[in-house]
Amino acid sequence: MDGTRQALLRWMTGVMEARGWSARAWAQAAGVTASNLTRFLHDPRTGSLPGTDTIGRLARAAGAEPHFLDDRRFPRLCRVPVLERDQAVAVLALGRRAAEVYVADRLRDGGPCVPVDRPVSRRAFALRVGARTLNAAGILPDDRVVLEPADEVEPRAGDVVITVGDDGVCGYRYHPPFLVPVSTDPDCGPTALDRARLAGVAMQVVRPLRG
């Protein structure tokens, strides 16, 4: 099987497994005919390849696209959605699979997103930093901080972590059993780890060059 067919098959089966979709359900969500998928899936070596319009519609419905380049030579560009605080709270309350779907939907809906330069989990997202959220760590207002859930990337002592609460977003250094503020915001005081709602481990900062 050639590389194009392998990439399409890997992408299509991966999406259906991750989302729990049948070919028919995916086709319905994308507004395409199910036979456009099933012909290829039943016979990936010689079956008819989906057309570019079909692939585009499938990618939009799935919130992911096939990758035809050799990632070792051309690392692919990943994106994560930028969530508001209430959206971050919502995604943290979900199970793993539901959270993956939520994040993918935010990308598919065309909301704000940022590129990342490393592979990320399907639950990774970014938060926009407020005025004093992480200023003592050198992270500036309007920066976007890419976060991985703590059960995807286990935090280590000294890592920057973000919490979300009813009063806002706070940044800390991870020093269990405590979190030490990296913020001059008086609402972001020292706190016990077991009393914090941990949004994730800060993995990357994306800084806009112009407003």
Image (tube, rainbow, N blue to C red):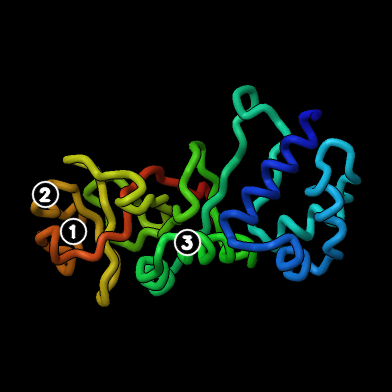
Q: What kind of element bears circle 1?
A: loop
Q: How far is mark 2 from mark 3, CA to CA?
A: 28 Å
Q: Please give the residue where the numbered disc 3 appears in the rendered image.
A: 97
132 relative to 85 in the view: left or right: left
Q: How far is mark 1 from mark 3, CA to CA?
A: 36 Å
Contact? badges 1 and 3 (CB < 8 Å): no
Q: Please give the residue where the numbered disc 1 appears in the rendered image.
A: 184
Between discs 1 and 3, the one toward the N terminus: 3
Residue type pointed to by label 1: Thr
Q: Nearer the viewer, residue 100 or 128?
A: 100
Contact? badges 2 and 3 (CB < 8 Å): no
Residue type pointed to by label 2: Pro
130 relative to 159 in the view: left or right: right
Between discs 2 and 3, the one toward the N terminus: 3
x then y, percent, for residue 211: 53, 57
Q: Which residue is located at x 21 percent, y 56 percent?
A: 183
The residue carrying pointer 2 sits among few (fewer than 14), some (14 to 19) or many (20 or more) residues within 10 Å by Cα, namely some
Which marked residue is nearer to the observer: mark 1 or mark 2? 2
Q: What number is the disc on residue 122?
A: none
x then y, percent, for residue 115: 55, 46
Q: Please give the residue where the numbered disc 2 appears in the rendered image.
A: 176
x then y, percent, for residue 164: 29, 66
Which marked residue is nearer to the observer: mark 2 or mark 3? 3
